[in-house]
Image (tube, rainbow, N blue to C red):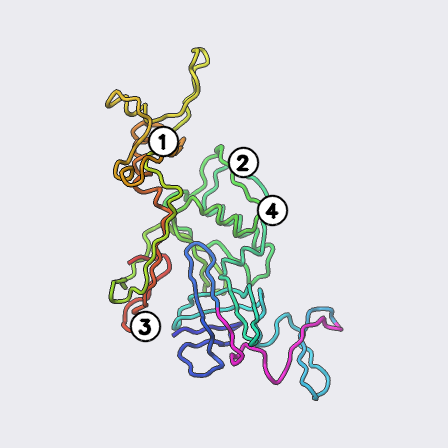
Amino acid sequence: MFRAYCDDVLFYDDESTLDEYKLVDPQLDLVENDISTFTFTIPVTNVLHELSQEERYRMHSPTTGNIAYYTFRAGKGEPVYYYSFKRPGKLIPFVSVIKVYRDDELWFEGCPTTVSRSFDMSRTITCESVLGYLKRSVPLPITHKGVKYSLENKIKMILNAHNNMVERKYEIYCGEIDTSVDKENVEPSDENFELTADSCFDNLQAVFKNYVGIYTVRLAEDGKHYLDYSDKERPKCTQQVNFQENLLDYTEDWSFEDICTCVVPLGKKIEGNPNLPGSNDRYLNLQDYYKEIESSSRDYFLKSSLASDYGVIAKIVKNEDITRPLDLWTMARKYLEDTQFADMTIEISAFDLSYLNEVEPPALGGYS
């Protein structure tokens, strides 16, 4: 059902009984909006391991000066030279292309980035997905002032800088950008768009940090990689996770270091009148809200249910885009009830029922 190829050479088949196509602890970690990884250990019996009847060495070609590989068979005369940047049938870090299929669907594509060898001569390999190709390049640092670029144009700037620096097989092009906001360029503004001296991957992450959609890299029929983005409705998986059926493990992880039970929200900055003594600059706060409805000078929002459990823990939350007192009160309430819990992570391990039944397997970015 799962098969893995190295430069189109099969080296793993979970349904095969042959040792040549077996791996130790293969693990595929598909990550949303980040670099996915495929980790596995190659035993000595695998087709990708060192061949027992020959040894391959890496050297510079005496005729061309390029990197070449030659094979030496003991007692059989002179070495045979292979003038190539790639060893035949070998896994080469940052060069070999690893693909993982489930049935006929491509689930992972990337390059080996980490190789470790143990005393029994087995090798543990970690591969990063195609999105990791963007770590190989850096854009020319530049700040575009006074122009608000669309999301699509920002992506194209980064990918163009990447493609101008890498080999063709590592190029990534801008694909389908399906977003409800920021569709086209707008009139000149005070906003700046900056490309930093970090990798193209880091620049891309900085662009997407203010967006809530999903971006993925797909391999098209023309053999090129395209980066797609969508903030539309996520795909729904018909397979559910249920207790005593396919749920294997459940953990919650959340730090209480940043919890608060009382918020002092601040909105836009209000400049004081220089002609009035004692008129200082201040921020819109809840005093502007409460004095309108209850003649109170209270400037905080307290969540009683949280305070009864943890006591009063105050925190200032600022958003200068808020200009109305009612919106400030709404922000404070939402922060205490929802926003501050955004860093909570829930990890669920479940058995994929599609192995047993004709149900659809879970999809990256989907929900059930």
Q: Is residue 228 above or below residue 296?
A: below
Rendered-image quadrant of the N terminus = bottom left
Say if mark 2 contacts mark 1, CB within 8 Å: no
Where residue 63 appears, as percent x and y from the top left, is 75, 73
At label 4, the amino acid type is Leu
Q: Please tell me which residue is depicted at 30% across the width and 66% down the height of the picture.
A: 360
**N-terminal-most mark, 4 or 2:** 4
Mark 3 or mark 4: whose residue is earlier in sequence? 4
Q: Position of residue 2 (x, y in %)?
A: 41, 73
The CA distance from mark 3 to mark 2 is: 54 Å
Q: Give the distance between the C-alpha atoms of the residues marked 3 and 1, in whole angstroms.
A: 51 Å
**Residue denoted by label 1:** 265
Residue at 55%, 64% in the rendered image: 114
Which residue in the structure is indicated by mark 4? 140
Give the mark nearest the N terminus, 2 or 1: 2
The amino acid type of the residue labelled 1 equals Pro
Name the mark on residue 145. Answer: 2
**Amino acid type, residue under disc 2 in the picture:** Lys
The answer for how far apart the CA atoms under marks 3 and 4 are is 48 Å
